[in-house]
Amino acid sequence: MSEPKDVHLFCHRCSAELAPGQGDFYVVRIEAFADPTPPQFSGDFSDLDVAGEIDRLIEQMKDMSEQDLMDQVYRRFTLHLCGRCYREWIEDPAG
């Protein structure tokens, strides 16, 4: 059985090297997704051209990559932060 390769981690904010197993960093998982609330409709939609609306949306998205389209709906990522950066970030995550 081969030895596991050394894992090299760096703080995503300051690039300080992090030492797994030493308890000197934090793992932050962020999940962001588009508003899941169903849209509110009012009025009569009997005249709505559904096929035309679908075509319009497809045309609007034709130059977008699959990744661009997915990022508009859902995104998840993991950050590794050193202790100092974590303490700053946790007090003002949007700052």
Image: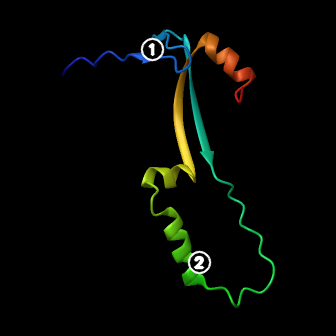
Q: Which residue is mark 1?
A: 20
Q: Amino acid at mark 2?
A: Glu
Crowd rating for badge 2 (residues with CA inside 10 Å; few <14, some 14–19, many 20+): few
Residue at coordinates 68% horizontally, 58% vertically from top-left?
36
Compared with residue 18, is residue 91 higher up or lower down, i.e. above or below?
below
Q: Nearer the viewer, residue 3 or 44?
A: 44
Q: Position of residue 93 (x, y in %)?
A: 70, 27
Circle 1 sits in a helix, a strand or a loop, which is it? loop
Figure quadrant of the N terminus? top left
Q: Nearer the viewer, residue 31 or 95?
A: 95
Residue at coordinates 55% horizontally, 70% vertically from top-left?
57
Compared with residue 56, is residue 9 higher up or lower down, i.e. above or below?
above
Q: Position of residue 12 (x, y in %)?
A: 52, 21
Q: Which residue is mark 2?
A: 53
Q: Position of residue 71 (x, y in %)?
A: 53, 49
Q: Nearer the viewer, residue 63 or 33?
A: 63
Label 2 or label 1, whichever lies nearer to me, is 2
Crowd rating for badge 1 (residues with CA inside 10 Å; few <14, some 14–19, many 20+): few
Q: Amino acid at mark 1?
A: Pro
